[in-house]
Amino acid sequence: MKQAFDRVLLIEDDSVEAALIRHCISSFAGARAEVDHVQRLAEGVSRLAERPYDVVLLDLNLPDGSGISNLHRVKAAAPTVAVIILTNVEDQEGPVAAMAEGAQDYLTKRHMTSELLSRSIRYAIARQEVETSLRASEERYALALAGARDGIWDWNIEQGEIYYSPRWLALLRLSASDAPPTPATWFDRVHDEDRAGLEKALDEHLSGATPHLEYEFRIRTGSGQVLWAQCRGVAVRNASGRATRIAGSLTDISDRKSTEALLVHEVLHDALTGLPNRSLFLDRLDLAIKQHRRDPRRQCAVLFLDLDRFKAVNDSLGHAAGDEMLVEFAKRLRMFLRPGDSVARLGGDEFAILLNDISGLGEATLVAERIHDMLSLRFAIAGKELYATASIGIALSGPEYERPGDLLRDADLAMYRTKHERTGSYTVFSSRMHESLQRLELETDLRSALERSELVPYYQPIVSLEEMRVIGFEALLRWFHPVRGLIGPDEFIPLAEKGGMIGPLSWWVMQEACRQTHAWQNSNPAFSDLSISVNVSSRLFSEPEFATRTLAILDRTGLKPQALHLEITENALLQHESATIRELTALQETGVKFHLDDFGTGYSSLSYLSLFNYDTIKIDRSFIAGSAGSHRNRRIVDALLGLGRVLGMEVIAEGVETEEEAQKLRDLNCRAAQGFWFSKPLPSESAHALLVREHGRHLDVTMLHPNGGSPDN
Ligand code: C2E
Ligand code: MG
Ligand code: MG
């Protein structure tokens, strides 16, 4: 063990103490020992980086650093140097902590003597050496363990020699004679693309920037095969922290790498056809879109393909035949690819092609045509000859596309068009298609809206103009869409009719409105004559047993038939059979009333009025709004009121928005009206509150006029 020392670094800001220590050292070591003295920690750290020292005498109280962190900085600069802490008498805890953190000894400045200092330095150096060799042997032990499986290498950096263990040579299929103990034996075999990375990792560890070396690289074996290898190593450093030796292991990780590669492939490819899947396709499309955004001349297009009648192949020839067809189709699609293009299977019988760097739409439609030509060649599947067609949608890159999913969606939408209009051809996407997409989405949402209680009936009062009181309500449906917010019936009722949901929806509204009205009627004798108007779509009449179901609802809710008013539009009965008319008439005979809604907006031929014996006509709001000002509208309203009187029908004016309009209608002897002037459609609680409020007003009036004065309007 060394214990002798040549170089001492003294880091101490107090120059008197420093002179004293210098004196002590020279008294026992004489001229042999070189003592460098610095007053600041930063200076000390930079000295340590410049040259090796045997021991550092360190004050924990310096102008640019104090406490245990001084020790940490010294050890970081020179991990293997021995450190003695210089302390003051008052400081009891500092040195103890410093010993625990890796200092080798400590001295109290006031009690310092040459003898104590000399002994401390020797002790600290000896202790540091033991610690270093202990660590090295631990490392060697760890290496030995790893060596059973892995190759071991041990590199003497100063001599430029590497020892390669027999296992290392065996892994690389090398015999000792083709493997001189030089770095070249290893590094010359490393794959060109990995060499710089390995060298960098090595440098980083040797310079102390990383705690150990670990790197994965490809390496060529003696038999010419390429392995994936992982090396690990730890440097052994001299007293000044410089790496003199580095030793470690080499592991063959080819198996792990190929499983990884396989997994990556599996995650990004379709198992049946081996084509990229949707997520890989979207990745590539993303790159193409970014390229287009940087340079708009570089366009790309997506072709979305869907095999026509694929289900029929599956059903008639079996799934194996279906699979065979898809594989064959995929093979043919690949033929269209130029190097930058991609084809992917998105799922089922859906495929997508990305055409990169094209000059414009023309190129994309050309590919679509060629795909159709290619499909016209027969497929030999399951011993049968088949012909296939595909519907294609095309979307071209443009500034409006930021996300790959959007371009793919638009190509899909265009394909959908093809399917519906011209199966087996292609369609180029246009932004108009979005509207139909939105309708489609809304239609889907509407299916679940009932279950999710997003549909709510609102109630708009119908008032008697003579008495100015509520005589009934019209139920008007509202949809509170979770994303789009409030949607009006003019938007979703047609969707419900088209999508076949109008039945369940209408029955639900009727049931709910009847239940609500009956509850209001029961809440106060003054409300017992309230009526409820429910809009009935013409689609509902075609439901079998329309009358029976309506009566069942009345039965269930306890509402009198006279209180239920069904609103149907002029055109609703046009295409209906006499059976329907008979059904409605039967219902009418039970007491249910029929209102002709929006009168004046449909065919408005008087002869249609004779188709069915309506109880009431509702004059459409287009004749009311502005009727106060428009002479012509006023005359129409007057004529319609006259018509009602002649035919024995009640009349309700819709869309009364001002006091003036209400007054004019009253002058014309119109008895009932509905409109914003009186109230907008209200949620049920507000409608009830309105009833109660209005009733209160009547009560007050009756109290003022005990003999039955006319209510105060
Ligand atoms: P509608 O049956 O003619 O209902 C009257 C419409 O006029 C309502 O529109 C009402 O809010 C609106 N309105 C009432 N007073 C005024 C006013 O003073 N000024 C103006 N500008 N408008 C007024 P809403 O609620 O949007 O309903 C539209 C249509 O949707 C209804 O017209 C009806 O045909 C249909 N509808 C509503 N609910 C249902 C339902 O449950 N089933 C069916 N099949 N159709 C319904
Ligand atoms: Mg109506
Ligand atoms: Mg109406």
Image (cartoon, rainbow, N blue to C red):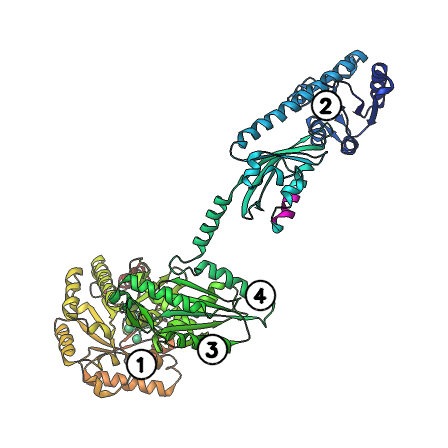
Q: Position of residue 618 (x, y in %)?
A: 27, 78
Do labels 1 and 3 touch, CB within 8 Å? no
Q: Nearer the viewer, mark 4 or mark 1?
A: 4
Q: Check disc 1 and report its element: helix, strand or loop.
A: helix
Q: How many numbered dots are placed on residues in this image?
A: 4
Do labels 4 and 2 touch, CB within 8 Å? no
Which disc number belongs to residue 83?
2
Q: Residue at x 51, y 34 (%)?
A: 149
Mark with earlier residue (4, 1) = 4
Q: Which residue is mark 1?
A: 667
Q: Nearer the viewer, mark 2 or mark 1?
A: 2
Please report the bounds of the magenta region as a residue range: 194-199
Q: Could you give the CA–CA distance between mark 1 and mark 3, rounded to whole angstroms?
A: 72 Å
Q: Nearer the viewer, mark 3 or mark 4?
A: 3
* Circle 3 crowding by C-alpha within 10 Å: few under 14, some 14–19, many from 20: few
Q: Position of residue 266 (x, y in %)?
A: 43, 53
Indicate yes or no: mark 4 CB to ligand 1 under 8 Å. no
Mark with earlier residue (1, 3) = 3
Q: Nearer the viewer, mark 1 or mark 3?
A: 3
Q: Amino acid at mark 2?
A: Val
Q: Which residue is mark 3?
A: 366
The answer to whether 370 appears left or right of 101 in the picture is left
Q: Nearer the viewer, residue 27 or 14?
A: 27
Q: Residue at x 48, y 61 (%)?
A: 282
Which disc number belongs to residue 291?
4
Do labels 2 and 1 touch, CB within 8 Å? no
* Circle 2 crowding by C-alpha within 10 Å: few under 14, some 14–19, many from 20: many
Tell me if residue 611 comes above or below residue 707 in the rendering. Answer: below
Ligand 2 location (quadrant): bottom left
Q: Check disc 4 and report its element: helix, strand or loop.
A: helix
Q: Position of residue 90 (x, y in %)?
A: 72, 17
Q: What secondary structure predominates along the stretch shown in magenta?
A: helix
